[in-house]
């Protein structure tokens, strides 16, 4: 089962991309037999934010094409929601969705998201 990288998903989503035909053909040949990782989703989220494209839609599309390994779909979609609807930065959103409710960080954004910051008493 091949790993699908960021450029593959970008090419699928953009009919003007020079790699679009390649990506569509590859998708047809490997439908249901590819996987990706949270790293690809972070990279796609950064691209989506830069281009003003909703992150939730991009991530949902990717998850309908490829299996996600190393994180849950719920984690990925929760991060996308934080980015699109709560104005949270890409990295903070993924940290918040993956930290299981507690995080060691000096960043106050996590408290606003209901994530408990541990070790903050030492700041």
Image: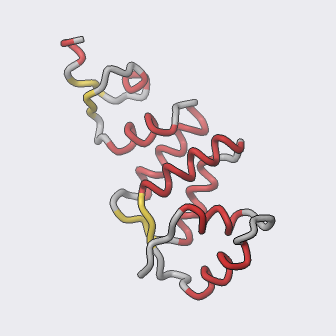
Please identify the quarter of the rendering in which residue 84 is found: top right
Q: Residue furthest bottom?
A: 29
The residue depicted at 54 percent of the width and 84 percent of the height is 30
Give the left or right position of residue 87, taking residue 73 as reference: right
Task: Name the residue: 47% across, 82% down.
Answer: 33
Whether residue 84 sits left or right of residue 66 in the image: it is right
Name which quarter of the figure residue 11 lies in.
bottom right
Please tell me whether residue 106 is drawn above or below residue 54 in the rendered image.
above
- Residue 32 x/y as whole percent: 51, 81
| Location of the C terminus (image quadrant) | top left
How was the colour assigned to the protein in this rendering? secondary structure
Percent across and percent down for residue 20 are 72, 72
Left-right relation of 101 to 17:
left
Residue drawn at (50%, 70%) of the image: 4
Please provide percent x and percent y for residue 91.
45, 38
For the point 43% across and 54% down, the residue is: 39
Q: Is residue 14 above or below residue 102?
A: below
Farthest residue in the front direction?
18
Q: Is residue 10 above or below residue 28?
A: above
Q: Residue furthest right?
A: 16
Relative height, residue 37 to residue 29 (above, below):
above
Q: Can you give x and y, in whole percent of width and height, for residue 110 in the image?
A: 38, 26
Q: Count numbered badges in the picture.
A: 0
Residue 108, by quadrant, is top left
The N terminus - image quarter: bottom left
């Amino acid at each position: 089962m091949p790993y699908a990288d960021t450029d593959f998903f970008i090419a699928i989503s953009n009919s003007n991309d020079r790699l679009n035909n390649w990506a569509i053909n590859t998708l047809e040949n490997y439908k249901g037999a590819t996987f990706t990782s949270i790293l690809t989703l972070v990279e796609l989220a950064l691209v989506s934010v830069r281009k003003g494209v909703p992150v939730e839609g991009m991530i949902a599309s990717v998850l309908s094409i490829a299996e996600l390994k190393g994180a849950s779909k719920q984690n990925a979609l929760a991060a996308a929601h934080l980015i699109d609807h709560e104005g949270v930065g890409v990295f903070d959103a993924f940290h918040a969705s993956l930290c299981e409710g507690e995080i060691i960080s000096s960043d106050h954004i996590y408290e606003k998201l209901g994530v408990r910051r541990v070790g903050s008493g030492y700041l």
